[in-house]
Image: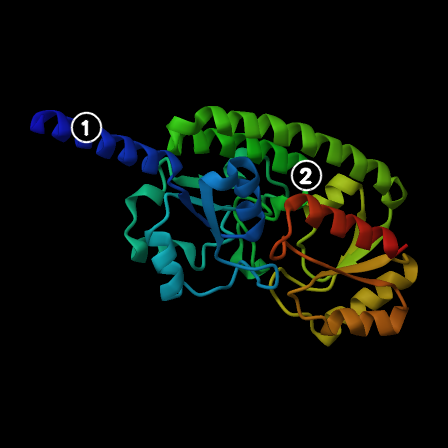
Amino acid sequence: MFILIKKHLLLMLIFLFCSANSYAKINVFACEPEWASLVQILAGDRVKAFSATTALQDPHHIQARPSLIAKARRADLLICTGAELETGWLPLLLRKSANRKILPGQTGHFMASDHVLLLEKPKQLDRSQGDVHADGNPHIHLDPHRIMRIAEALSRTLSRVDADNQADYQNNWISFKESWSRAIAKWEQLCQSLRGKQIVVNHNSWVYLEDWLKLKRLATLEPKPGIAPGSTHLAQVLVQLKDSQADMILYASYQNDKAVRWLEQKTHIPVVELPFSVSTNETLFEWYDRIINQLLDSQ
């Protein structure tokens, strides 16, 4: 009888252990909110996603704070943009966290830019030209077609990190693909009137949005990427816009709007402040809806 009770208790412990493992959440460290939102869509309750930055921060320039290091140390999966976007802080974060699972080359290390073609790759790398990225412009999350390709690659990574739930990740990817495709078709239909619109940008953040919606960039307020505009350059932009009138001036919510407002005052061109990433409690779908609506409202 005693042996039977011990066997029964052992079986119960094994069952409880397996059940706990089946429902254990994967800790995901996302460098930007868009990837935290995407992985949440693809994995649902199976992940606990944390974003190191918010929509109101410049992802180029944050500090590898102790709180972020602690989060990275516990992560099972790291999802970042790559293409040198986080080069100022991510290498230090990885080194300090000492978490082998999320190091380059490991299954838990996912760079979104590795899975899509990047635009504006410099023919010559010259740091005197400002904040130039050797692999190309990293702001890939502003093209929903690239988001689709990244989502497919991420679903495969989730299946490798958590092989026991591979079927769920595959089903979630199929569901996302269908919903996202319908959303793209809707957005593109709504944005027909935006094709060919001429824009001025504060920083060269919008190249993928421009490429997708067929917007035409006339000028950039920064003389070089990451270099604040001075009076001489702004005067040159003003002269340029006398020959070609822009339809709108775009800038991200986290960016300084001093030069933008100066140009607005001089030219009366409408200014559109766009959210550069997903806000708290907002999905990728809702964020794209918001961007599209703000662009359309500016007409």
Q: Quadrant of residue 269?
A: bottom right
Mark 2 and mark 1 lie on one chain; the one further toward the N terminus is 1
Specify how the rendered protein is coloured: rainbow
Residue 263 shown left or right of residue 129 in the figure: right
> Tag 1's secondary structure?
helix
Residue under numbered circle 2: 144
Residue under numbered circle 1: 8
Horizontal and vertical percent for residue 1? Answer: 9, 25
At x 75% / y 52%, what residue is drawn? 290
**Category of crowding for the residue at label 2, using alpha-carbon neighbours closer than 10 angstroms: few (below 14), some (14–19), many (at least 20):** many
At x 84% / y 67%, what residue is drawn? 238
Q: Nearer the viewer, residue 229 or 279?
A: 279
Whether residue 103 appears in this view of the structure is: no
Q: Nearer the viewer, residue 154 or 202?
A: 154
Q: Which amino acid does the dot numbered 2 rest on?
A: Pro
Horizontal and vertical percent for residue 4? Answer: 13, 25
Horizontal and vertical percent for residue 89? Answer: 43, 59
